[in-house]
Image: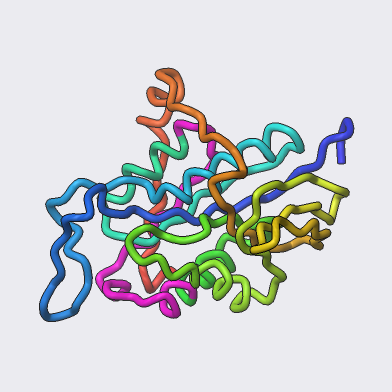
Amino acid sequence: MGGGRLSMEIVVCVKQVPASTRVRLNPATNTIVREGIDMMLNPFDAYALEEALRLKESAGGHVTVLSMGIPSAAVLLRQALALGADRAVLLSDKRFAGADTLATAYTLAAAVRKLGAFDLLLCGRQAVDGDTAQVGPSLAQKLGVPHLSAVRRVRVASARELLCEKMSDEGYLEIRLSLPALLTVVKEINTPRFLNLQGYLQSLSAEIEIWGADDL
């Protein structure tokens, strides 16, 4: 801790999803055909990224953005760098194709271990193309860390604890959570920032690391 600031290692998991509900399925694999259609950052993940950036600005630290997808998903990672993330890693390999939530969490867990020690993992509550809300909790389970879902507010309580508000059917619960941990967040947590020209120009020369199955 220096000057009253902490230094948190934050990893944000993001996903590229179709920008339209009019999608096609591959009849052989029953997976979404992602080539040739407009894609965007999963809306819930935008709130997770924004919260990571706010924690970095208030408490200090480093933000890594991690995604699993086809090569074109590098575009959304570059956008994350433009907004203020420090590092971007894309997991892209034909052997990852058609992964269900279990396989996705398994692969993400392997990547997080390769990244090294972390304090906080942030995910959107769910992806709009699958709506399962399973990957975040499953990832936490595979990494052996506590997790909270549907988090609407995060405060740094101490060097190793967060104070979180988790939405429930009756309102919300206030929970103290030890780090390292994983949170999935809801849209009530913040308002994502807009991309600015300076950040965009800087991101054009930033490195996007590509990891395949052999790297993990």
In the image, the segment drawn in magenta is 82-105
Q: Of 129 and 122, which appears nearest the observer?
A: 129
Q: Position of residue 46 (x, y in %)?
A: 48, 44
Residue 58's quadrant in the figure? top right
Residue positioned 53% across, 39% down in the render: 85
In the figure, 50 relative to 96: above or below? above
- Residue 87 appears left or right of 36: right
Residue positioned 44% across, 18% down in the render: 198
Q: Of 77 and 124, which appears nearest the observer?
A: 124
- Residue 53 appears left or right of 60: left
Protein image colouring? rainbow
Q: Position of residue 79 (x, y in %)?
A: 40, 37
Residue positioned 36% across, 43% down in the render: 76
- The quarter of the rendered structure image containing the N terminus is top right
Q: Position of residue 195 (x, y in %)?
A: 43, 27
Verify whether residue 103 appears in magenta: yes
- Residue 32 appears left or right of 107: left
Q: Position of residue 92 (x, y in %)?
A: 32, 62
